[in-house]
Amino acid sequence: MTTVTYSVPAMHCNHCTHTIEMEVGELAGVQSVKANLDARKVEIMFDAPADETQIKALLAELNYPAEGLITL
């Protein structure tokens, strides 16, 4: 299982977080999606067939582009 956390500055309301969680959560292989509005970050846990390229492309398509990977 891979876990990534992206900075997503375009989030500005609870509708944004809900959209991200629902849409990314539907990708095959995605186990969980947690969008944090206050921190403007999204944590995603996934396995194959999902991959970072696919996830980042979907976020961009939804108009919430990932602007960086947050390392803990």
Image (cartoon, rainbow, N blue to C red):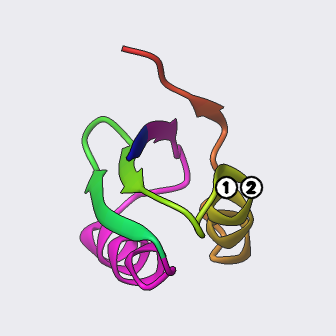
What percent of the width, then of the height, locates residue 72?
Answer: 36, 14
Residue 52 shown left or right of residue 46 in the figure: right
Q: Name the residue under label 1.
A: 65
Q: Which amino acid does label 1 sit on?
A: Pro
- The front one of 11 and 72 is 72
In the image, the segment drawn in magenta is 4-28
Residue at the (66%, 38%) spot, across then down: 67
Instruction: Say which of marks 1 and 2 sits in front.
Output: 2
Indicate whether 10 appears above or below 23: above
Indicate whether 30 appears above or below 40: below
- The front one of 69 and 51 is 51
Indicate whether 43 appears above or below 68: below
Q: Mark 2 points at which residue?
A: 53
Identify the secondary structure beneath mark 1.
Answer: loop
Residue at the (63%, 57%) spot, across then down: 51
Identify the secondary structure beneath mark 2.
Answer: helix
What percent of the width, then of the height, locates residue 50?
Answer: 58, 66
